[in-house]
Amino acid sequence: MLTIIYPYYNSIKALEIQIDNWSKYPIELMKKLHFILVDDCSDSKADLAINFPINFTLLRVTDNIPWNQPGAKNLGFKFAKTDWVFTSDIDHILLPEMCEKLIELKKEKKTVYYFSRLTGKGENRDSHPNSFLIHKDVFWELGGYDEDFCGHYGYDDILLRTMIQSHCKTEHLNSINLINYPTLRSSDLDRNRRKNKRLLKKKKKQLQKGKYQNKRILRFNWESFKNLNTAS
Protein backbone atom coordinates (compact mmCIF):
# COMPACT_ATOMS: atom_id res chain seq x y z
CA MET A 1 0.00 0.00 0.00
CA LEU A 2 1.16 3.53 -0.78
CA THR A 3 -0.09 7.05 -0.06
CA ILE A 4 0.45 9.70 -2.73
CA ILE A 5 0.32 13.33 -1.57
CA TYR A 6 0.11 16.45 -3.72
CA PRO A 7 -0.38 20.04 -2.56
CA TYR A 8 -2.45 22.20 -4.91
CA TYR A 9 -2.61 25.94 -5.38
CA ASN A 10 -4.37 27.54 -8.36
CA SER A 11 -2.76 25.12 -10.85
CA ILE A 12 -5.85 24.13 -12.79
CA LYS A 13 -4.01 22.82 -15.86
CA ALA A 14 -1.59 20.74 -13.75
CA LEU A 15 -4.52 19.26 -11.82
CA GLU A 16 -6.25 18.32 -15.07
CA ILE A 17 -3.07 16.54 -16.21
CA GLN A 18 -2.87 14.71 -12.86
CA ILE A 19 -6.45 13.49 -13.00
CA ASP A 20 -6.05 12.36 -16.59
CA ASN A 21 -2.95 10.40 -15.55
CA TRP A 22 -4.73 8.81 -12.56
CA SER A 23 -7.56 7.70 -14.85
CA LYS A 24 -5.04 5.46 -16.65
CA TYR A 25 -4.08 3.53 -13.49
CA PRO A 26 -5.33 -0.09 -13.67
CA ILE A 27 -7.81 -1.07 -11.00
CA GLU A 28 -5.49 -3.63 -9.36
CA LEU A 29 -2.93 -0.84 -8.85
CA MET A 30 -5.58 1.60 -7.64
CA LYS A 31 -6.56 -0.83 -4.88
CA LYS A 32 -3.08 -0.37 -3.39
CA LEU A 33 -3.13 3.44 -3.42
CA HIS A 34 -4.56 6.31 -1.43
CA PHE A 35 -4.33 9.73 -3.10
CA ILE A 36 -4.38 12.87 -0.93
CA LEU A 37 -4.79 16.28 -2.54
CA VAL A 38 -4.37 19.32 -0.27
CA ASP A 39 -5.94 22.46 -1.73
CA ASP A 40 -3.92 25.22 -0.07
CA CYS A 41 -6.67 27.89 -0.04
CA SER A 42 -6.67 28.30 -3.82
CA ASP A 43 -8.51 31.19 -5.48
CA SER A 44 -9.81 28.54 -7.85
CA LYS A 45 -10.79 25.60 -5.68
CA ALA A 46 -9.89 22.14 -6.87
CA ASP A 47 -12.58 21.03 -9.31
CA LEU A 48 -12.48 17.25 -9.45
CA ALA A 49 -14.31 15.48 -12.22
CA ILE A 50 -13.41 11.94 -11.15
CA ASN A 51 -15.42 9.17 -12.78
CA PHE A 52 -13.05 6.24 -12.27
CA PRO A 53 -12.30 4.00 -9.26
CA ILE A 54 -9.98 5.70 -6.76
CA ASN A 55 -9.25 5.94 -3.04
CA PHE A 56 -9.00 9.67 -2.61
CA THR A 57 -9.11 12.39 0.05
CA LEU A 58 -9.44 16.11 -0.71
CA LEU A 59 -8.38 18.42 2.13
CA ARG A 60 -8.73 22.18 1.95
CA VAL A 61 -6.74 24.76 3.90
CA THR A 62 -9.10 27.63 4.73
CA ASP A 63 -6.53 30.20 5.93
CA ASN A 64 -4.87 32.13 3.13
CA ILE A 65 -1.18 31.85 4.07
CA PRO A 66 1.36 32.69 1.34
CA TRP A 67 3.77 29.88 0.46
CA ASN A 68 2.12 27.39 2.80
CA GLN A 69 3.28 24.30 0.89
CA PRO A 70 5.20 22.94 3.93
CA GLY A 71 2.00 23.15 5.99
CA ALA A 72 -0.07 21.61 3.21
CA LYS A 73 2.28 18.63 2.95
CA ASN A 74 2.31 18.19 6.73
CA LEU A 75 -1.48 18.03 6.61
CA GLY A 76 -1.30 15.38 3.89
CA PHE A 77 1.10 13.27 5.96
CA LYS A 78 -1.25 13.52 8.95
CA PHE A 79 -3.94 11.83 6.86
CA ALA A 80 -1.66 9.18 5.35
CA LYS A 81 -2.95 5.69 6.14
CA THR A 82 0.05 3.71 4.89
CA ASP A 83 3.62 3.27 6.12
CA TRP A 84 5.12 4.51 2.86
CA VAL A 85 4.33 7.89 1.36
CA PHE A 86 5.25 9.40 -1.99
CA THR A 87 4.98 13.18 -2.28
CA SER A 88 5.69 15.63 -5.06
CA ASP A 89 4.49 18.91 -6.56
CA ILE A 90 1.29 19.07 -8.56
CA ASP A 91 3.17 19.59 -11.87
CA HIS A 92 5.03 16.26 -11.51
CA ILE A 93 3.22 13.10 -12.54
CA LEU A 94 3.93 9.49 -11.68
CA LEU A 95 3.00 7.27 -14.59
CA PRO A 96 1.22 3.97 -13.77
CA GLU A 97 4.25 1.84 -14.66
CA MET A 98 6.47 3.97 -12.41
CA CYS A 99 3.98 3.69 -9.57
CA GLU A 100 4.03 -0.11 -9.97
CA LYS A 101 7.81 0.01 -9.49
CA LEU A 102 7.38 2.01 -6.27
CA ILE A 103 4.95 -0.58 -4.94
CA GLU A 104 7.30 -3.44 -5.82
CA LEU A 105 10.47 -1.72 -4.59
CA LYS A 106 12.23 -3.47 -1.71
CA LYS A 107 12.27 -0.59 0.75
CA GLU A 108 14.36 0.08 3.84
CA LYS A 109 12.68 2.11 6.57
CA LYS A 110 15.58 4.51 7.15
CA THR A 111 16.15 5.13 3.44
CA VAL A 112 14.57 8.04 1.56
CA TYR A 113 14.23 7.56 -2.18
CA TYR A 114 14.58 10.21 -4.91
CA PHE A 115 13.87 9.89 -8.61
CA SER A 116 14.98 10.84 -12.08
CA ARG A 117 12.97 13.51 -13.85
CA LEU A 118 11.95 14.12 -17.45
CA THR A 119 10.12 16.91 -19.23
CA GLY A 120 6.94 16.19 -21.12
CA LYS A 121 9.16 16.00 -24.24
CA GLY A 122 11.38 13.33 -22.66
CA GLU A 123 14.34 15.60 -21.87
CA ASN A 124 16.33 14.88 -18.70
CA ARG A 125 16.08 17.28 -15.76
CA ASP A 126 17.80 17.36 -12.37
CA SER A 127 16.26 15.38 -9.52
CA HIS A 128 13.55 17.31 -7.68
CA PRO A 129 14.20 17.83 -3.92
CA ASN A 130 10.48 18.06 -3.15
CA SER A 131 9.72 14.66 -4.72
CA PHE A 132 10.56 11.60 -2.64
CA LEU A 133 9.40 8.34 -1.10
CA ILE A 134 9.68 8.15 2.69
CA HIS A 135 8.42 6.03 5.57
CA LYS A 136 5.75 7.99 7.44
CA ASP A 137 7.35 7.34 10.87
CA VAL A 138 10.70 8.62 9.62
CA PHE A 139 9.07 11.79 8.25
CA TRP A 140 7.67 12.58 11.70
CA GLU A 141 10.86 11.57 13.48
CA LEU A 142 12.55 14.31 11.43
CA GLY A 143 9.80 16.71 12.51
CA GLY A 144 8.06 17.03 9.15
CA TYR A 145 8.28 20.26 7.20
CA ASP A 146 9.21 23.32 9.27
CA GLU A 147 6.29 25.73 9.04
CA ASP A 148 8.44 28.66 10.19
CA PHE A 149 9.20 28.97 6.47
CA CYS A 150 5.52 29.47 5.58
CA GLY A 151 4.50 32.99 4.68
CA HIS A 152 7.65 33.64 2.63
CA TYR A 153 9.21 32.08 -0.44
CA GLY A 154 11.94 29.47 -0.65
CA TYR A 155 14.25 27.05 1.17
CA ASP A 156 11.66 24.97 3.08
CA ASP A 157 12.52 21.90 1.01
CA ILE A 158 16.26 22.49 1.47
CA LEU A 159 15.99 22.28 5.26
CA LEU A 160 14.06 19.00 5.19
CA ARG A 161 16.49 17.53 2.68
CA THR A 162 19.38 18.56 4.97
CA MET A 163 17.64 16.76 7.83
CA ILE A 164 17.16 13.68 5.67
CA GLN A 165 20.81 13.63 4.63
CA SER A 166 21.89 14.00 8.27
CA HIS A 167 19.73 11.21 9.70
CA CYS A 168 18.87 8.83 6.83
CA LYS A 169 20.35 6.96 3.95
CA THR A 170 19.28 8.35 0.56
CA GLU A 171 19.02 6.54 -2.73
CA HIS A 172 18.47 7.91 -6.22
CA LEU A 173 16.39 5.58 -8.38
CA ASN A 174 17.40 5.99 -12.02
CA SER A 175 14.82 3.38 -13.03
CA ILE A 176 11.91 5.49 -11.75
CA ASN A 177 11.24 8.89 -13.25
CA LEU A 178 8.71 11.64 -12.83
CA ILE A 179 7.35 13.68 -15.72
CA ASN A 180 7.42 17.44 -15.12
CA TYR A 181 4.85 19.56 -16.93
CA PRO A 182 5.72 23.19 -16.09
CA THR A 183 2.68 25.37 -15.49
CA LEU A 184 2.19 29.10 -15.22
CA ARG A 185 3.35 30.62 -11.94
CA SER A 186 1.08 32.68 -9.72
CA SER A 187 2.24 36.19 -10.55
CA ASP A 188 0.66 37.87 -7.53
CA LEU A 189 2.86 36.13 -4.93
CA ASP A 190 6.03 37.69 -3.52
CA ARG A 191 9.06 35.57 -4.46
CA ASN A 192 11.59 37.44 -2.36
CA ARG A 193 13.84 34.84 -0.72
CA ARG A 194 15.71 37.06 1.75
CA LYS A 195 13.75 36.25 4.91
CA ASN A 196 13.77 32.49 4.38
CA LYS A 197 17.43 32.56 3.36
CA ARG A 198 18.29 34.11 6.73
CA LEU A 199 15.98 31.64 8.46
CA LEU A 200 17.66 28.68 6.73
CA LYS A 201 21.08 29.90 7.87
CA LYS A 202 19.83 30.12 11.45
CA LYS A 203 18.22 26.66 11.32
CA LYS A 204 21.38 25.07 9.90
CA LYS A 205 23.42 26.50 12.76
CA GLN A 206 20.94 24.97 15.19
CA LEU A 207 21.31 21.64 13.36
CA GLN A 208 25.10 21.77 13.65
CA LYS A 209 24.84 22.37 17.40
CA GLY A 210 22.21 19.65 17.88
CA LYS A 211 19.68 22.24 19.06
CA TYR A 212 17.24 22.19 16.17
CA GLN A 213 13.60 21.41 16.95
CA ASN A 214 10.60 21.79 14.69
CA LYS A 215 7.88 23.76 16.42
CA ARG A 216 4.12 23.40 16.19
CA ILE A 217 2.74 22.04 12.91
CA LEU A 218 -0.62 22.65 11.20
CA ARG A 219 -0.82 26.31 12.20
CA PHE A 220 -3.94 26.92 10.14
CA ASN A 221 -7.57 25.95 9.77
CA TRP A 222 -8.55 23.24 7.33
CA GLU A 223 -11.44 21.01 6.34
CA SER A 224 -11.85 17.52 4.95
CA PHE A 225 -13.79 18.25 1.79
CA LYS A 226 -14.19 14.96 -0.07
CA ASN A 227 -13.51 11.25 0.45
CA LEU A 228 -13.83 8.59 -2.22
CA ASN A 229 -13.25 4.89 -1.62
CA THR A 230 -14.30 3.41 -4.91
CA ALA A 231 -11.17 1.30 -5.57
CA SER A 232 -11.17 -0.74 -2.37
Image (cartoon, rainbow, N blue to C red):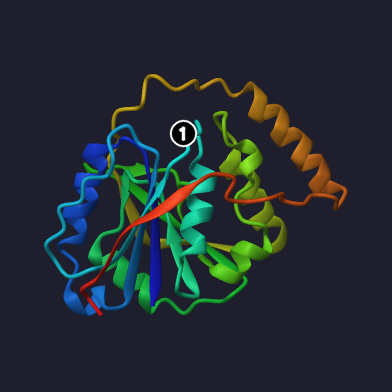
User: Which amino acid, by three-letter code, is at mark 1?
Assistant: Asn
* Position of residue 160 in the picture relative to residue 123 (left or right): right
Q: Is residue 77 left or right of residue 194?
A: left
Q: Quadrant of the C terminus?
A: bottom left
Binning the other alpha carbons within 10 Å of mark 1 as few (below 14), some (14 to 19) or many (20 upward) gives: some
Relative vertical location of residue 105 with respect to residue 37 in this rendering, above or below: below
Q: Is residue 173 above or below residue 157?
A: below
Quarter placement of the N terminus: bottom left
Which residue in the structure is indicated by mark 1?
Answer: 64
Q: Looking at the image, which residue sits at the far left?
A: 51
Residue 177 position in % (x across, y down):
35, 56
Looking at the rendering, which quadrant does residue 55 occupy? bottom left
Quadrant of the rendered image containing residue 35: bottom left
Q: Position of residue 24 (x, y in %)?
A: 15, 63
Task: Kindly tell me whether residue 210 is visible in this rendering.
Answer: yes
Q: Regarding mark 1 in the picture, which secondary structure is present there?
A: loop
Q: Is residue 130 visible?
A: no
Q: Quadrant of residue 197?
A: top right
- The residue depicted at 32 percent of the width and 72 percent of the height is 33
Side (left or right) of 196 relative to 1:
right
Q: Residue at x 59, y 24 (%)?
A: 193
User: Residue at left 34%, top 53%?
Assistant: 178
What is the x, y in percent for residue 225?
Answer: 33, 55
